[in-house]
Image (tube, grey):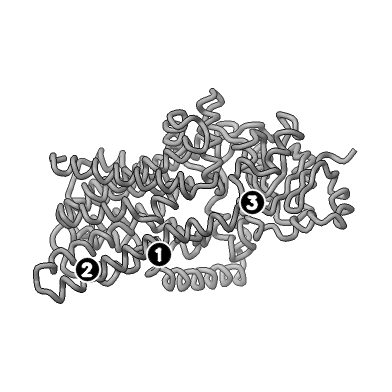
Amino acid sequence: MTRAEGRDAVLVALLSLAASHAAHFLLFSGGATYEFCQYGEIARNLLEGKGLTTQVFWPGELAVLAAAGKGSPEYALPMSRYPLSALWTALWLPLGGGGDYGRALSGMVGAALWAAAVRVFLGRLWGARAGLWAAAFWALNPVVTAGYALEGYVEPLYGAAVLWILWRLVTGGRPMEAFLLGAAAQGLHGSFIVVAPAFAAAAAAMDRARWRSAAALLGGAFVMGAAWSAVLSLGASAAPPLLLWNLMDGALTGRLPAMSYAVPSWSAFASLPAAAALLFKAWRQLNGTLADLPALWGIELLVPAAVLGFVQAQGAARRAAFVAGAALAWALTVFSFLTHERLVFLGYRYFVWSSPLVAAAAAAALLERWDRGRGWRLAGAACLALQLQQSVWLYASRRLEGDASRAAPVESLPELDAVRRLVPAGATVLTNMPAQVAWYARRRAVALPHEAAGAFPLRELHRASFLLLSMDGAGEPRNHAAWLSLLRPEREALLLRLGYAPLWRSGTALLAGPRL
């Protein structure tokens, strides 16, 4: 790294940290996402000497554990989380005081490293000035600093790793470095195994001399994925059928088949109607994603300039655009068959790794044309002004959205206080906000199954003797309409039939204990 690269990287990292800290203090209202709270809980368990474990379970995970003869452990290795991301969270959690700020700090530092990676790696491809402008934009992008960095998603650090991988694949490097980068990316984000073959194949197709590094990258991802699956299977846990759950989602079942207490089988697809349902799901989701893609991640106003930047790209920049484009096209195709997850404000998180390239290509195109005449300067200034006002609006809308959705921080919710007061330590809570119960109330928690009848095996076999229902946005009430009808006092008879009796209730939440 040159001195100029190092200086610029530090500056944009500090800019990103300043922006994310401002967003944290002005906009943050607590751990509203599953990822924020569960990674925080896993990190805390690790720091307290309990290992890389969790007390948060999906019903389907408990079914898999029971089928594997693992029973219903109090703590288990996280079946749906990534080990290196958990370790990264544990690194920063104590430095931030062990609470919400410490949990958010890992995302904010990850976002700062992502901005620095934009400057260093994309600057080497599109030029130092373009890299600096793109990195400055990325450091201030509200979708990153007020979104991914604060909501607990693993994308910021993973995005930095992908940029390093892309640069290495198109400029050359030792196979061992590519192997380690592939393993690291897979350890940070389990979806890397989906795009790794496309990265490797496209890089080797562009330059056959790169085939060793491409193969090493792919090997690193597969070794890390296989190693983590082996750890899960051999430890007090089990390797979950993540691929099968993803394929079933929206094709053979409703949303999130892991919410059902059942072990899925590949025989579910052994019929023409099932295969047709999967193909129709893929077609529907692919077209939905293509329609949404130009307006994602707060960069849509840069897209016209980015098109010019990609067209004029030469040398390593052109190779990078080809490799990233091939990987993105492959990911769009494969993920159309899997779980469809377009997050409010954040967009499609499985593709966000590609978005800094749009900023870099746009910056290169605008800078190259700036001196061509007044018309180009006016066009460039208009593009930047429109993008700036949109970023300001996104920060403002984030503030409005947060105020509208929650009157108090998640940690201060009355229902979580009721859990802390009324549920004994060591008990298990069946709830629509399991990660929040584990993170804020320190109780073992199981996510609600799709149907109320699914509570019986969870209560009898997995000790889910308490029930918490909440209308707060952190509990994703839209996914639990049938359950939340139990909040009405006239539905108490059904609650009693399920084996629960009310302990505490408010207008928007209910805590029930075992029926005596």
Towards the viewer: 500 or 251: 500
First in sequence, mark 3 or 2: give its number. Answer: 2
Which residue, given by chain and number where applicable, does mark 1 sit on?
A: 296
Given the image, on which type of amino acid does mark 3 rest? Gly
- Residue 467: which quarter of the image? top right
Mark 3–mark 2 contact, CB under 8 Å?
no
Residue underneath mark 2: 381
Q: Are marks 3 and 1 in contact (CB under 8 Å)?
A: no
Label 3 to label 1: alpha-carbon separation: 25 Å
- Residue at 43 percent across and 29 percent down: it is 95
The N terminus lies in which quarter of the figure? top left
Mark 2: secondary structure: helix
Image quadrant in which the C terminus is located: top right
User: Distance between the Cα atoms at labels 3 and 2?
Assistant: 43 Å
**Residue, disc 3:** 475
Q: Residue furthest left?
A: 372
The mark found on residue 444 in the picture is: none
Tell me where residue 322 appears, x and y as whole percent. Answer: 24, 63
Is residue 457 found left or right of 119 in the rendered image?
right
Image coords of residue 228 (percent x, y):
47, 38
Residue type at mark 2 is Ala
Q: Residue at x 76, y 53 (%)?
A: 507
- The image shows residue 429 at horizontal and vertical percentages of 72, 40
What's the residue at 83%, 44% (across, down)? 502
Drawn side of residue 277 relative to residue 12, left or right: right
Pick the residue in front: 374 or 334: 374
Marks 1 and 2 sit apart, C-alpha to C-alpha, by 22 Å
Q: Amino acid at mark 1?
A: Leu
Tell me which numbered mark, 1 or 2, is placed earlier along the sequence: 1
Q: Nearer the viewer, mark 1 or mark 2?
A: 2
